[in-house]
Image (tube, rainbow, N blue to C red):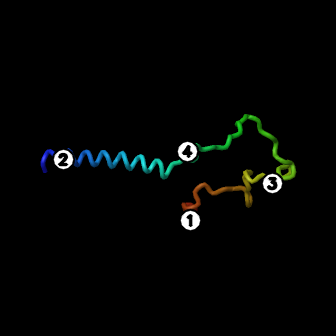
Amino acid sequence: MKKNDLTLLAVVIIFSTVFAVIISSLLFTGPDEQSQTVEKVQVITSEFNEPNDEYFNNESINPTKLIRVGDGESNESPFIQPNNQ
């Protein structure tokens, strides 16, 4: 390629890039679409309201309480056979 060909190619690339940016900004983004609204967020406070007594009361079952079934003796290592033979 000659020096004139490279210069012409560079000018065409620059011109087409500028033209594409201008046309795309006119077609795809109008003035109404450039602004955006967001909803406001409530302020987080350290207050904690007590839950409704209808659902959370003192007489309800506590699911985090340990439940034992049987006499309460536990086998610390259930997979090891005792040597009582």
The amino acid on which the numbered mark 3 sits, given as a three-letter code, is Ile
- Is mark 3 in CB contact (under 8 Å) with mark 4? no
Mark 3 or mark 4, which has the lower sequence index?
4
Mark 1 or 3 closer to N-term?
Answer: 3
Q: Residue at x 56, y 47 (%)?
A: 33
User: What's the residue type where badge 4 is placed?
Assistant: Pro
Q: Amino acid at mark 2?
A: Leu
Question: Which residue is drawn at the image coordinates 75% and 54% (left, top)?
Answer: 63
Relative to 69, 32 lies left or right: left
- Residue 61's disc is 3
Estimate the x, y position of residue 27 in percent, counting from the top left. Answer: 48, 52
For the residue marked with disc 1, what is the amino acid?
A: Gln
Decide which of tag 3 and tag 2 comes sooner along the chain: 2
Outermost bottom residue: 85
Q: Give the label on residue 6, or none.
A: 2
How packed mark 3 is, by other alpha carbons closer than 10 Å (few <14, some 14-19, many 20 or more), is few
